[in-house]
């Protein structure tokens, strides 16, 4: 049984008394492996129930940015990460409780296969007693469907298991074979056909972003129509969710960044940012100003610039040719205002970026170095990093920030890094962190709520004054 940081099973926490929480139907949508269709099924479920007038809150296990964009389009609601390591046990508990207060259904898309990762989707299911919906690509299966179902349900003792849905199954006869071989102890929710019109296109970092898909709503409505023909058309049984004990964290965060205008570049080239990061900055009192490095001629007025990751390699020529915006970006840096750059945002600040075809593009030139896109995956995984430079001059005990990286580029940066990440759970060394004048940059994507005090320092407009 999973335990909390206090060493107690979750069911035995002092304030986790049955009948004192909030009830809400909930499912964790998982599968034997990546590529089984979890995102499509989760999105179809969300859109179907939304179309019935229900409020659906969707979460994503793990650090992925792109799936939440699809899920947000499907549900109409912001999608937050739900990960026992990245977000933390109490953070996950708080998110689920608040979702249960205002939602008719909670859906959680798992990561990779059900038991993959440390922690895994199964860990989350067990920890919060949320039943698992198994999505099985049964397009080339018959009796093996029953064996895979048995493995998902029984590999881990006492795992809450709702049942299975057969994905990419086109005929009633095929469904009949699958259902006939399945033990009566497992609920069979039906099938979703293999339908190219609802298949979400992919590229090197995963699914294509929702904002790039012109027919995304038509796709989602069609997927929802398929879902309406299954046993998941009605709400499942409710799960009880419990509040987090009151702490002082909200008081620490509240209004610390009041009067700080944070510019966030957000467009098709730069869109990989946690919803929780935005919520954190707003809770801290910051004014958020969005702009586009692709379409805006000028950078708006602000105190701090936040450059998230994304796909600068796909829009490198347009970025290079937006000269007035680049001029404003350089002027902002010259004014010694803080700039925080993650992954693709860091590439944008380099001198040069070479795309997959070998074509070279001049970038902002604010960080000495260049980057090369490659077809081989360069790095992936959850990571943490020590950032003691942010603690000075105050005595801050915890200087660890959590996050992750995922990229297909390699960067040659002619700076001495100030820190290096460690992968979770292996502890092997990962990404470098650079401090150059007023710029903090890394391939790592920061999860700001993982260390609120440190994050407030990172976005302090007076840090370099």
Image (cartoon, rainbow, N blue to C red):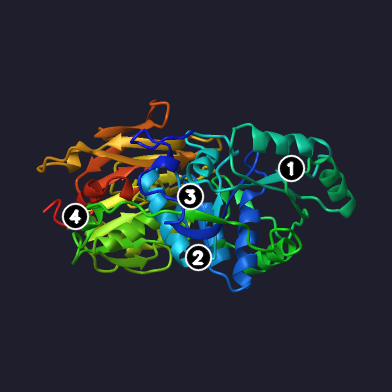
SS assignment at label 1:
loop
Q: Position of residue 266 (x, y in %)?
A: 40, 61
SS assignment at label 4:
loop
Residue picked out by circle 3: 313
Q: Is residue 416 left or right of residue 355?
A: left
User: Upstream in the sequence, badge 3 or badge 2?
Assistant: 2
Residue toward you, 231 or 323: 231
Asked if residue 328 shows in the view, the reply is: no
Report, in whole angstroms, how far the alpha carbon at label 1 lies from the one at label 2.
Answer: 29 Å
* Quarter of the picture holding the C terminus: bottom left
Report, in whole angstroms, how far the alpha carbon at label 1 lies from the one at label 4.
Answer: 56 Å
Report, in whole angstroms, how far the alpha carbon at label 3 lies from the one at label 2.
Answer: 38 Å
Asked if residue 249 shows in the view, the reply is: yes
> Quarter of the image holding residue 303?
bottom left
Q: Are marks 1 and 4 in contact (CB under 8 Å)?
A: no
Depth-wise, is mark 3 or mark 4 nearer the camera?
A: 4
Q: Residue at x 32, y 45 (%)?
A: 450
Residue picked out by circle 2: 103
Q: Are marks 1 and 3 in contact (CB under 8 Å)?
A: no
Q: Residues within 10 Å of mark 4 (few under 14, many from 20)?
A: some
- In the picture as drawn, the residue positioned furthest to the bottom comes out as 53
Q: Position of residue 278 (x, y in %)?
A: 35, 59
Residue picked out by circle 4: 460
């Amino acid at each position: 049984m999973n335990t909390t940081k206090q060493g107690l099973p979750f069911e035995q926490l002092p304030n986790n008394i049955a009948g004192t929480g909030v009830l809400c139907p909930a499912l964790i949508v998982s599968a034997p492996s990546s590529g089984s269709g979890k995102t499509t099924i989760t999105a179809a479920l969300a859109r179907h129930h939304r179309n019935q007038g229900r409020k659906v809150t969707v979460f994503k296990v793990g650090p992925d940015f792109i799936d939440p964009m699809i899920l947000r389009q499907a549900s109409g609601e912001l999608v937050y990460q739900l990960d026992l390591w990245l977000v933390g046990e109490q953070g996950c508990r708080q998110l689920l409780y608040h979702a249960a207060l205002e939602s008719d259904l909670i859906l959680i898309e798992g990561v990779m296969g059900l038991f993959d990762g440390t922690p895994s989707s199964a860990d989350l299911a067990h920890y919060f007693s949320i039943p698992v919906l198994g999505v099985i690509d049964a397009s080339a299966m018959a009796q093996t469907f029953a064996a895979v179902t048995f493995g998902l349900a029984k590999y881990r003792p006492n795992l809450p298991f709702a049942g299975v849905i057969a994905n990419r199954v086109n005929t009633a006869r095929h469904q009949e074979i699958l259902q006939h071989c399945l033990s009566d102890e497992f609920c069979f929710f039906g099938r979703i056909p293999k339908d190219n019109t609802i298949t979400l296109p992919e590229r090197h970092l995963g699914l294509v972003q929702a904002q790039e898909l012109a027919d995304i709503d038509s796709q989602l409505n069609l997927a929802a129509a398929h879902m309406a023909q299954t046993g998941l058309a009605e709400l499942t049984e409710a799960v009880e969710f419990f509040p987090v004990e009151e702490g002082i964290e909200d008081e620490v965060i509240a209004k610390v960044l009041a009067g700080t205008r944070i510019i966030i570049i957000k467009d098709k080239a730069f869109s990989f940012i946690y919803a929780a990061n935005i919520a954190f900055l707003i809770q801290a009192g910051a004014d958020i100003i969005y702009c586009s490095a692709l379409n805006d001629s000028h950078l708006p007025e602000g105190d701090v610039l936040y450059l998230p990751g994304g796909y600068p390699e796909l829009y490198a020529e347009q970025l290079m040719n937006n000269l007035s915006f680049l001029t404003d970006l350089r002027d902002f840096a010259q004014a010694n205002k803080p700039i925080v750059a993650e992954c693709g945002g860091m590439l944008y600040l380099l001198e040069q970026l070479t795309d997959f075809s070998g074509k070279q593009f001049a970038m902002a030139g604010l960080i000495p170095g260049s980057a090369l896109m490659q077809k081989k995956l360069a790095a992936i995984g959850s990571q943490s990093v020590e950032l003691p430079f942010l603690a000075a001059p105050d005595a801050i005990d915890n200087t660890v920030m959590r996050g992750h990286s995922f990229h297909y580029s390699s960067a040659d940066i002619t700076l001495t890094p100030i820190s290096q990440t460690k992968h979770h759970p292996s502890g092997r060394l990962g990404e470098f962190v650079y401090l150059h004048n007023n710029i903090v940059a890394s391939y790592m994507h920061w999860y700001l709520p993982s260390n609120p005090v440190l994050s407030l320092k990172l976005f302090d407009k007076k840090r370099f004054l």
